[in-house]
Image: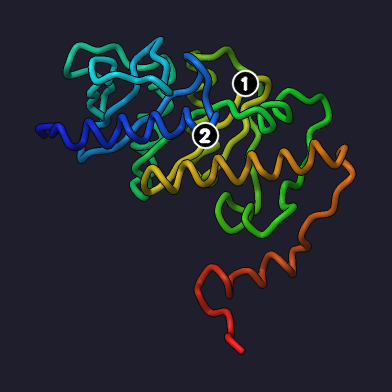
């Protein structure tokens, strides 16, 4: 598949948007985008907020081979593994926003993040937590791939977060809403209330656009 200049530009705009929202800093985090049977992946050591065209790896999803000679992020193993297992998603975002990463580093982490309706509506009512493995390690990659089989949002202990989405905005929105929830939790000093299961179930009306208008 031939990659167009327009697709390259779309990827760069999305990467820079991730940086502008302070979801990544300097060389932290990475981004990938499915285009048929290949994926664009931010290159190893690149700064996502300032990503350049020559730092984008074009990788075959099936085996991870770089088709343009650019070495992909060291976390590309889980990016491509997720894309292989999740045909319903096209974007994988690994980031390290401040409040969500603060919670990722907490000894006693919250179990329930559903402080506002946006969290279960966009991120899912359960956020998976992956134990610490060295960044770039096969163990981390497999743990993230496994967690992402039935979650869209994952916290990596002492590391950061991973999100998937049907497009760039979908993945970024998940990252922003988890960050918002974590900021609320931190500011509340871990003394906070969450939506009940009944209230979460009731959100189906909102998600499906069935809210009655009076």
Residue at mark 2: 21
Residue at mark 1: 159
Residue 12 pos. (x, y %): 31, 29
Which element is circle 2 on?
loop
Q: Is residue 171 above or below residue 62?
A: below
Near-viewer residue (88 or 190): 190
Task: Residue at 52%, 30% (x, y): give it.
Answer: 144
Q: Mark 2 packing: few (<14 Cα in 10 Å), some, or many (20+)?
A: some
Image quadrant where residue 76 sits: top left
Query: Considering the image in quadrants, where does the C terminus appear?
Result: bottom right
Residue 121 pos. (x, y %): 58, 58
Residue lying at the far left in this picture: please name it.
2
Residue 105 pos. (x, y %): 73, 23
Q: Is residue 176 above or below residue 32?
A: below
Q: Is residue 21 above or below residue 134?
A: below
User: Depth-wise, is mark 1 or mark 2 nearer the camera?
Assistant: 2
Task: Residue at 78%, 63% (x, y): give it.
Answer: 196
Image quadrant where residue 211 sits: bottom right
Task: Residue at 79%, 33% (x, y): give it.
Answer: 109
The reply, left or right, for residue 125 in relation to residue 138 is right
């Amino acid at each position: 598949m031939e990659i167009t200049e327009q697709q390259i530009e779309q990827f760069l705009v999305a990467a820079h948007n991730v940086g502008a929202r302070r979801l990544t800093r300097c060389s932290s985090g990475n981004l990938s985008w499915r285009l048929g049977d290949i994926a664009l992946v931010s290159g190893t050591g690149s700064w996502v907020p300032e990503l350049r065209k020559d730092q984008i790896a074009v990788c075959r999803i099936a085996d991870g081979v770089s088709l343009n000679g650019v070495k992909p992020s060291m976390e590309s193993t889980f990016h491509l593994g997720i894309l292989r297992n999740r045909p319903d998603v096209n974007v994988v975002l690994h980031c390290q926003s401040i409040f969500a990463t603060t919670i990722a580093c907490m000894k006693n982490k919250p179990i329930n993040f559903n402080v506002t309706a946006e969290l279960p509506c966009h991120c899912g009512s359960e956020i998976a937590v992956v134990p610490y493995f060295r960044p770039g390690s096969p163990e981390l990659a497999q743990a993230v791939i496994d967690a992402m089989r039935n979650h869209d949002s994952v916290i990596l202990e002492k590391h950061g977060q991973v999100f998937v989405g049907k497009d760039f905005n979908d993945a970024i929105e998940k990252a922003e809403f988890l960050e918002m929830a974590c900021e609320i939790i931190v500011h509340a000093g871990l003394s906070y209330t969450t939506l009940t299961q009944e209230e979460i179930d009731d959100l189906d009306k909102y998600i499906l656009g069935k809210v009655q208008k009076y």
